[in-house]
Image (spheres, helix red, strand yellow):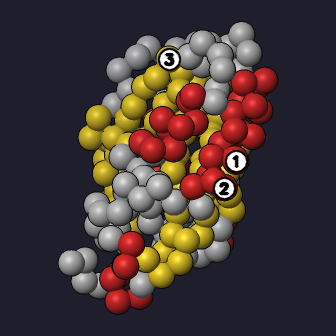
Amino acid sequence: MLDKIEKILISEEQLQQRIRELGAELTRDYADKNPIIVGVLKGVVIFYADMVKQIKVPCEMAFMTLRSYNGTESTGQIQVVQDVTADIKGRHVLILEDIFDTGKSLDFTYRHLMEREPASIKICTLLDKPSRRRPEITLQADYTGFTIDDLFVIGYGLDYDEYYRNLPFVGILKPEEYNSKE
Ligand code: IMP
Ligand code: MG
């Protein structure tokens, strides 16, 4: 698998270091708030597992699955495949996301959860690609791991056609791999 990687953008060590820093911030900000931490599957799964270990307050875990992407391009359609089952009314919700790209998924998730009247919703994204944001999206992340350029990245939960999620770093594929997966 490593022979398909053009470049490591964010190493395992850099990821873990930044997650510890975010964890210290979130631990302070969520003291006594008993947050529900919502992960948007599947991309967030690796970040989620590492991130929650650094949020040292009592919290609940919850997950949502959205379907929105084919390959590298958004279809523009977002569907809830699996919803948060917990009652979030009056609760402090922290959304964890892998990447804030066009912003359509996070905007959808935010509105979807807002309808259920939580006390607050904040967003923590591992990666942000602000140059890709759609102009109509005004939502911003409250906590960001790394801001990156307009590159299609894989690894640490992020996929290209469902592959490469299990890489421990964030990287980019060799150009030829973006067309032929095998
Ligand atoms: P959105 O465009 O902000 O709605 O992002 C939707 C989803 O697209 C993210 O949650 C990711 O699953 C996926 N995505 C966006 N950019 C990348 C990328 O660079 N690599 C892999 N997946 C991406
Ligand atoms: Mg995702």
Q: Which residue is mark 2?
A: 14
Secondary structure of the residue carrying tag 3 is: strand
Q: Amino acid at mark 1?
A: Arg
Question: Where the C terminus falls, by quadrant?
Answer: bottom left
Identify the residue at horizontal 55%, vertical 71% (top origin).
8
Mark sitting on residue 18: 1
Q: Which residue is mark 3?
A: 60
Mark 3 CB within 8 Å of ligand 2: no
Which one is in front, 52 or 91? Answer: 52
Whichever of callouts 2 and 3 sits on the residue coming sooner in the sequence is 2
Q: Quadrant of residue 120?
A: top right
Identify the residue at horizontal 71%, vertical 30% (top origin).
26
- For label 1, the crowd category at 10 Å Cα-Cα, with few meaning under 14, some 14 to 19 and many 20 or more, is some
x and y, in percent, of residue 59 in the image: 56, 16
x and y, in percent, of residue 93 in the image: 58, 25
Q: Amino acid at mark 3?
A: Glu
**Tag 2 near tag 1, CB within 8 Å:** yes
